[in-house]
Image (cartoon, helix red, strand yellow):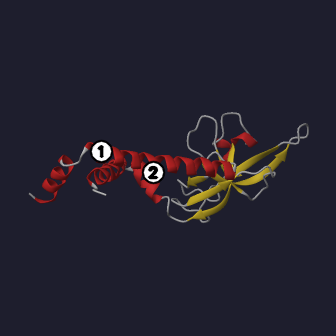
């Protein structure tokens, strides 16, 4: 019968108790991952402590598929820093360099203007209509480190969802058929 027949026989022989144990183990793994993510959010002060570079706008410094580690502190943002920001009306955060800093006289708050290293002009065309500067609440964090190319896994699974479904199915089958 081969591998498929053995797998079907293995699934049939699973007892309820073993299935519950495996489901609880899977739940504990997912819960642990969420706890680690929330702990990273608290430690870094960023709503998203890890992001993947999705475009080539920051080349040669960061390439598509690099993973950036973010930190958000109370220190003022300075020109030259690489920040990740959200723009009103867009779901995907953007990774670009701060090129100008504008301090508001009446409040002392700092607004910033950004630009991708590989882009010709600044990002004002990316901002919401009528917006000339990014405010502090738009900034998700400053890049403090990176891992090259590791984010390609995320990019491939986003661009080719069938791979994601195959991987999830294979992992689920592995959990169901394991006899530990």
Q: Quadrant of residue 86?
A: top right
* Closer to us: 144 or 169: 169
Residue at 64%, 63% (x, y): give it.
145
Q: Quadrant of residue 117?
A: bottom right
Disc 1 marks which residue?
A: 17
Residues at circles 1 and 2 in contact by the CB criterion of under 8 Å: no
Residue at 56%, 64% (x, y): give it.
147
Residue furthest left as drawn = 1
Packing grade of label 1 (10 A; few <14, some 14-19, many >=20) is few
Disc 2 marks which residue?
A: 29
Label whose residue precedes the other's in the sequence (1 or 2): 1
**Picture quarter with the N terminus:** bottom left
Q: Quadrant of residue 2?
A: bottom left
Q: Is residue 124 left or right of residue 172?
A: right
Q: Secondary structure at mark 2?
A: helix
Can the viewer see residue 155 in this picture? yes
Q: Is residue 70 above or below residue 125?
A: below
**Picture quarter with the C terminus:** bottom left
In front: mark 1 or mark 2?
1
Q: Is residue 52 left or right of residue 160?
A: right
């Amino acid at each position: 019968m081969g591998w498929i027949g053995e797998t079907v026989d293995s699934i049939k022989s699973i007892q309820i108790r073993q299935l519950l144990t495996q489901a609880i183990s899977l739940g504990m793994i997912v819960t642990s991952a969420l706890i680690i993510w929330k702990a990273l959010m608290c430690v870094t002060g960023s709503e998203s402590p890890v992001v993947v570079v999705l475009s080539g706008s920051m080349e040669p410094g960061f390439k598509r598929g690099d993973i950036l580690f973010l930190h958000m502190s109370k220190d003022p943002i300075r020109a030259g820093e690489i920040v990740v920001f959200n723009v009103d009306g867009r779901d995907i955060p953007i990774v670009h360099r701060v090129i100008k800093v504008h301090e508001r006289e009446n409040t002392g708050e700092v607004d910033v203007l950004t630009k991708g290293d590989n882009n010709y002009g600044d990002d004002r065309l990316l901002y919401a209509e009528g917006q000339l500067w990014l405010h502090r609440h738009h900034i998700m964090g400053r890049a403090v480190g990176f891992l090259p190319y590791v984010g390609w896994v995320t990019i491939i699974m986003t661009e080719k969802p069938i791979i994601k479904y195959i991987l999830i199915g294979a992992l689920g089958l592995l959990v169901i058929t394991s006899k530990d």
